Structures are given as structure tokens and as C-alpha cells.
Amino acid sequence: MNHRLFVSGHLVAALLMMGLVGATPVRAQSPDSSPANAYTPPRTPDGQPDLQGFWTNSTYTPLERPDGVTTEFYTPEGVAETEARAGAREAEQTVPGTIPDVHYDFTQFGLDRSQTTMARSLRTSLIVDPPDGRMPAMTEEGRRRVARREEEARLRGGRWDSAENNQLDDRCLIMRTAGPPMLNTSYNSNYQIVQAPGYVMILVEMIHDVRIIPLDGRPRPNPRVRKWMGTSRGRWEADTLVVETSGFNGKNPFNGSSENMSVIERFTRIDDDTILYNFTIDDESTWTQPWSAGLSMKKIQGPIFEHACHEGNYSMYNTLVGARLEEQLAAEEAAKQEPN
Amino acid sequence: MGIRPRKWTSLAIIITASLLLSVSSESGQAPAYRAPRTADGRPDLNGIWQAINTANWDIEPHAAGPSLVRELGAIVAMPAGLGVVEGGEIPYRPEARAKRDDNRRNRLELDPEIKCYLPGVPRSTYMPFPFQIIQTPEFVMMIHEYAGAARTIYMENHTEAPAPSWMGWSNGHWEGETLVVDSTGFNDRSWFDRSGNFHSDALQVTERFTPRSADTLNYEVTIEDPDVFTRPWIMSMPLYRRVEPNAEILEFRCVEFVEDLMYGHLRRQPDQ
């Protein structure tokens, strides 16, 4: 993975060129602050601030501040180093020279983040509140729920015992980061925003998930109509799109959340190529206080292609077949060992 | 004055007649309805729409039939339908008709809908689920409740399909009151209905969405696929606006409903 060093050198240069050399401009661009510049976004024909286009929220910045990091921001050199390390981890997640290395080398096809447009930041965590960059303490109820879910998963058996025992994204049901809140995946963290009168639509590339956000202040459906992605209602506050979502079905918990979680997202376009995306999580049955995080969405060229995940999920079938075959071979082996 | 009153009258008749002629030749029906306009002056197709027919069961005319699953009795028995195919019968090549019949016999195993696969086009439009049109000058999005299928119709910057896909690659343009969508780049895995009617990856679909009243659209589809059919053929049906004030696209995330069907036989059996 020698080219990783080559990339890291370019990262430093790129960050320097981006002007990420001092605290002031960085703070002005940091997700938690109000846009400091006087940028006025273009308007759609019906007068909405125009967020339309193709965007990515790909980033190496972790949700929570890593252990041992105590500052809110890295230096430009520091962030280049952490990005290079993270990129190297993505490139080296398989053993070089093996079949998995051929199939899952993320540096192939530009899948790894360092080769795509990234929402770069000097922040050491996406979480801005609490100020320590970590999720707040869990409530007793939240801890019990997490433990109960782990116990239920344990009782269901091993991951390869059945399709249902796999992760939601391996089952092509939903990405765990599809949101809201919308967080990056390891690749294809791409979105298309289209606005018609009364609606904002966000197409998520992964598993072709779509969010349709009405802006007309309509009431929420009966709470029995719960959804994987909840029900979203949006409004404009000046040039910021504010989206409130609740009514989750709880089957895709966000870091241990309950189905009672509500999410407030704020989308603010601060220049032609950047949307600031902040969100606040409120789930008093899970966390002792609401918490907030943010990242940027950077403009990409598009288009977004069809991600027919379930239709092409050969790995699910093949893996289950392989697991059953291994069990069969093990049983045959055990039978041979038994004295006649 | 060079023109006398009698000539005015005949001129008016000629103008009226030619207007009527041009209207009927453009839309195939009269009188034409003029839809409300978007900001850029196009017919406004925004809204939530749904077909009300039995085309998803069988696009050809058909009598009612029993459910394929005995235990479900009348619940998913097939309702009768007059059909949506112009002329009633799809012009299959002989070998393709045999494959359709084979598909039909084995539809419990073969219909992609049973596995919650993306519906393809035009089946997505007449699945028994609503879809929402989100229309801008650059894109017309069609967001389907069934399986969360999404179509992006490029109104500008028309390009070729980069690779085959379930929902195809769609370029659109306006012809007067009509949104015309040309789609290619399909794979050969989607069907037209639950009765085994199918296509190859040479499929070309031309759809025409024409407002016919405030709450209805005419939907006309031309199917071309020389590998499967002897000539192009046409389906047509109305689409209806979901007029409930609280209408919205809900989730039909059906993968979890089919996992046991698709992978249940590969489940680990309890140790003996």
C-alpha cells in the first residue's frame, strides 16, 4: 500500500490549498456555527433557498472524539495524519495477495474515501455538544435496552445461522446511517436533493432510500404508522431548512436509541459547493441530555446510479450456503472420529 | 376593405377547423385539457398518483382466477380485468410466447415481485401502490412506495445508460401538454405483470404522461423489444391523483417480508 504515503503527502498539500491553516476560517466553516459569510443561496422558482444538486457527506471525522484526543480541532498537519491513517486502514482491511484483497480492496474503483470528494474538517469529532465530543451518558433505561437487544441477538444465534441474524445493511434492508440523521457510509455517501413547491426530496444512493419531506405544515400520521426512517416534516427558517423527524419503528436504532427518538436536522447552504448539516438528537429514554453533531455536504458532479442491493445480494445466499456446508463437513469429520 | 364579411366567416371556419384538427392529432383526444403550469411554464404533474386497474395481475384481458396459495383463499385471488394492451394481445414472437407461458406456470418461483425486487418500467407505474412525482425543469423524480423504487428522469443533459439496471435510464422532454419519457438500459429481469409477461435487455420504453383533468393523467406506453415482440405495441390507462389531503408515500420496505421465503431453507437447523 505504498501509494497511501503518496496520497497522504497530497492531503497535506490539499488542505493547505483549501486554506485550512488557521482557526478563524475553520471556525467559520465548522458545522456548529452559523454561517459567518454573507452568501445568499440561489432561489428555486417557488422561492425556496436552493439546495438542489448532488452532494456527499463522505468524511473521515468520527462521530465521537477518539480516545486520547482532548482538543476540539486538529492542526492541518494533524488532520492530514489522521486521514492518512484512516485511509490506510480502509486499504489494508484485507490481507494483501489474498482473494479478499482483490475483491474488497477499497482503493480499487475509487471506493475508499480518500479518492472521492470529502467533507473535510479540522474537527476531532462530529459531535459538538456535549463539548467533550462524546455522546452523553445513557440513562438506566437506555442501558437496559441495549443489554436486552444484545441478549436477544445472542439468543438468535450466530451471524451466519440465518439471513435475519445479519446486519441490516448486509440484508439490504436499510443502511444504518440512512438516517435521519444522515451520516456517511464507508463508500457511496452520495445524495441528490430535488425541490418542488411544498417538498424537499433527498435520494440516498445506498439502497436507493428516498426521503420526501413536506413543507406545508401538515400533521403527522397516527403514531401507529411507524417507519424505518420515521416521518419528517420540514420548514424554512430564513435560509435554513429545518426538518423534524419522529415516528421511528425502532428497528434501526441509532447508537442505542429508542423508537421515541426525535431528530432535528438543519441544512444551510453556505456557498455554491457546501451545505452545513447539523442535527440534534432528543431521546430522553436513552440519553441524559439531547446531543448535537454536524458535518458538511460537498457538491459532487453526479449522477447517482441505481443501487439495487437486495436484487444483487449474492453474498447473502453464498455465505449461508457456505456456512451450512461447513457444518456438514464438520459433522462428517466428527462422525469419522467416532469409534465404530 | 379587401375582405368581405362572407370571406371572414369562411376564414373563421378554416381556422377553427385547423385548430380542432391540430388538437386531436396532438393528443389523440378532444377536447384537450390544459393543466395548471409550473413556474417554468410546463404542465404541473406534481402530486401523488396511482393506477386503479388489474394490470399488475395481467396486462392482457383476463377473467378472474384463483389464488396461487391455497391458504389465502379469496384474499389474493386474481380479479378480472379488461386489459390495458391496445388490441388486447401482446405481439410475442412464437418462442417468446412459449417462455411467457412457462413464466406464467412458474410465477410463484419466478415473478420478481414475489422476491421484493425492483419492479422495472412500466410496471412500477401500475403497481397497486402510490407514487409521487417531484417535477423540476432539470429532473422529474418518480418515487414509488413499492420497494422504495426511485426513478430519475433527466430533462436536460440527456445521456446514454451507463450500465443495465432494473429501473432503466430515463430521458424526458415535453411535447405540449405531454411529458414524454424515453427509457433504455434495462436488464432482462423485470416483468410487466404477475402473469409472466416479460422483455429482454433490448427493451425500449416510451411513456407519455398527459393531464386529462385536474386529478387524472392519461398514461400511454409504447413497448419496443425486437428480441421478444414482432412489432412495437402500446398500453394505456388513466392514473388517478390521491386526493386525500394527508396523502403521502409511506414505506413498503419488503425485503424483510421475503427473507424467510428466499433464505429460510439455508437456516441453521437445531443441533440433533
Image: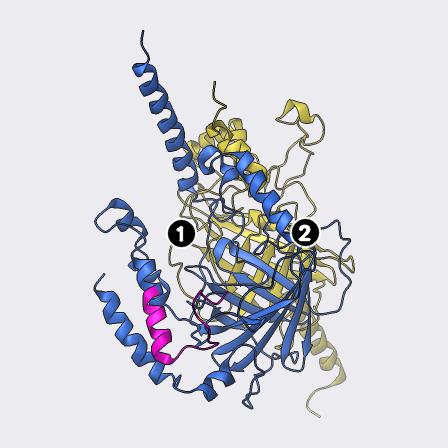
Chain colours: A blue, B yellow
Q: Looking at this view, is A117 or B107 the one in front?
A: A117
> Could you classify mark 1 by the number of other residues whose Cα lies within 10 Å: few (under 14), some (14-19), or many (20 or more)?
some
Left or right: residue A136 versus residue B201 is right
Percent x, y of residue B118: 52, 47
Q: Which residue is drawn at the image coordinates 76% and 56% (left, top)?
A: A221
Q: Which residue is drawn at the image coordinates 49% and 34% (left, top)?
A: A162
Q: CA distance from mark 1 to mark 2?
A: 49 Å
In magenta, the rendered stretch is A64-85
Look at mark 1 in the image and give the residue it sits on: B164
Look at mark 2 in the image and give the residue it sits on: A141
Q: Secondary structure at mark 1?
A: loop
Q: Which residue is drawn at the image coordinates 41% and 45% (left, top)?
A: B226
Q: Any mark on residue A215, and which?
A: none
Percent x, y of residue B67: 65, 27
Chain letter of disc 1 in the image: B
Left or right: residue B5 versus residue B185 is right
The C terminus of chain A: image quadrant: top left
Q: Amino acid at mark 2?
A: Glu
The question of residue A70 being in magenta is answered with yes
Chain letter of disc 2 in the image: A
Percent x, y of residue B210: 64, 61
Percent x, y of residue B245: 78, 60
Q: Is residue B114 visible?
A: no
Q: Find out whether the residues at labels 1 and 2 contact each other: C-beta distance under 8 Å.
A: no
Q: Secondary structure at mark 2?
A: helix
> Could you classify mark 2 by the number of other residues whose Cα lies within 10 Å: few (under 14), some (14-19), or many (20 or more)?
some
The N terminus of chain A: image quadrant: bottom left
Q: Looking at this view, is B73 or B91 the one in front?
A: B73
